[in-house]
Image (spheres, rainbow, N blue to C red):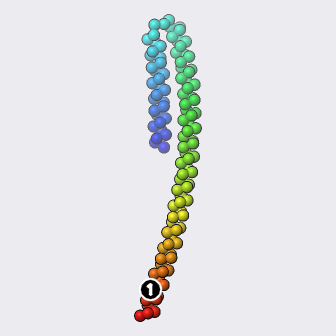
């Protein structure tokens, strides 16, 4: 979860930095104020749209990774349960062998 949060923080910082950089570049460009404001508005809308697209892509990717992680977890859980069951069976078998051997030694003595 912390990876998802840090990725979101990074993307937010990236977009804010890009927006500030674009605005600074436009403000320092030698153009009339009205033209600069128009460009700032257009760039702001473009960045907003791109941020929405990237957010949707990131959300979809996170959901895919979450689903894949869930599947892997279920597979590993099934393998672990199988190994535990096999271990129990092996322990029961060994116990029966040892008890049988003990009974044989008692009968022989």
Q: Name the residue carrying label 1.
A: 102
Count neighbours of disc 1 (C-alpha within 10 A) and say few if under 14, some if 14 to 19, many if 20 or more.
few
Q: Which residue is at the front of the view, 12 or 91?
A: 91
Q: Which residue is at the front of the view, 21 or 33?
A: 21
The residue lying at 54 percent from left, 35 percent from top is 58
**Residue that protrudes farthest toward the top in the picture:** 32
Answer above or below: position of 33 versus 7: above
* Residue 69 rendering spot, x and y as whole percentages: 53, 48
In the image, taking residue 29 as reference, residue 49 lies left or right, namely right
The residue lying at 55 percent from left, 32 percent from top is 55
Answer above or below: position of 29 versus 86: above
Answer above or below: position of 15 versus 65: above
The residue lying at 55 percent from left, 50 percent from top is 70
* Residue 105 rendering spot, x and y as whole percentages: 43, 89
- Indicate the quadrant where residue 42 lies: top right
The residue lying at 49 percent from left, 69 percent from top is 87
In the image, taking residue 67 as reference, residue 95 lies left or right, namely left
* Residue 54 rendering spot, x and y as whole percentages: 55, 31
**Residue that protrudes farthest toward the left in the picture:** 109
Q: Which residue is at the front of the view, 66 or 87?
A: 87
- Indicate the quadrant where residue 61 lies: top right
């Amino acid at each position: 979860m912390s990876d998802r949060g840090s990725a979101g923080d990074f993307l937010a910082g990236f977009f804010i930095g890009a927006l500030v950089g674009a605005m600074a570049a436009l403000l320092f460009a030698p153009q009339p104020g009205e033209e600069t404001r128009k460009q700032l508005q257009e760039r702001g809308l473009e960045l907003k749209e791109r941020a929405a697209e990237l957010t949707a892509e990131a959300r979809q990717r996170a959901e895919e990774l979450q689903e894949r992680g869930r599947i892997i977890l279920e597979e590993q859980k099934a393998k672990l349960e199988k190994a535990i069951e096999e271990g129990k069976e092996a322990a029961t078998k060994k116990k029966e062998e040892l008890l049988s051997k003990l009974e044989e030694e008692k009968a022989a003595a």
